[in-house]
Amino acid sequence: MTQVRGTSRAMAADVDIVLNTASDLTRAPAWLPAPVQVVGTGAGTVDLRWRDESVHRYEIDLKAAEHRLAWHPTGDGGWAGELRVTEQGAGSSRAELLVEAADDADAGEVRTVLDAALQALAAEVDQNFNVS
């Protein structure tokens, strides 16, 4: 497995709001990028489909005190990863996505997907928590 870092992104909300938005599995379809489809959720798990391939179940591990949200496939295949959120002051934060993808995964495509996820997460946070 190879670790690929997506570009981090500033968020116009504090760490807890960003982390709570990301860890709320009912909000996952709103911020996961188009090639990823949520097909089910359970207690601490989410079932995802990448494009039209098979479904993978992931265990979700929220470490709120560390400002981290991790996911791990419960079987073969799928990408393990982590969202880290850090405080930036004045009610803002920075989110970074990290994933472990197969060696044959296209690094540019992986980065594009991660960037799209961060952009959509920022929009979800803005839409739901920064209403004026």
Image: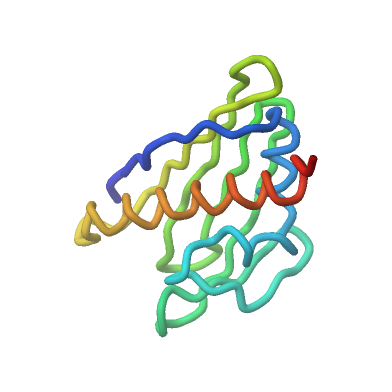
State how the image is colored. rainbow
Q: Quadrant of the C terminus?
A: top right
Q: Residue at x 43, y 68 (%)?
A: 76
Please state the total of marks drawn on the protein image.
0
Q: Residue at x 78, y 63 (%)?
A: 43
Task: Name the residue nearer the viewer: 121 or 65.
Answer: 121
In this rendering, position of residue 40 left or right of residue 49: right
Percent across and percent down for residue 122 are 58, 45
Tell me the quarter of the picture where residue 98 sits: top left
Q: Residue at x 54, y 61 (%)?
A: 32
Q: Is residue 63 above or below residue 78?
A: above
Q: Is residue 34 above or below residue 89?
A: below
Residue lying at the far front in this picture: please name it.
Answer: 132
Residue lying at the far top in this picture: please name it.
Answer: 89
In this rendering, position of residue 3 left or right of residue 26: left
Tell me the quarter of the picture where residue 110 sits: bottom left
Q: Residue at x 43, y 34 (%)?
A: 8
Tell me the quarter of the picture where residue 50 sits: bottom left
Percent across and percent down for residue 119 are 49, 48
Q: Is residue 114 above or below residue 26?
A: above
Task: Name the residue nearer the viewer: 91 or 2.
Answer: 91
Percent across and percent down for residue 46 are 65, 66
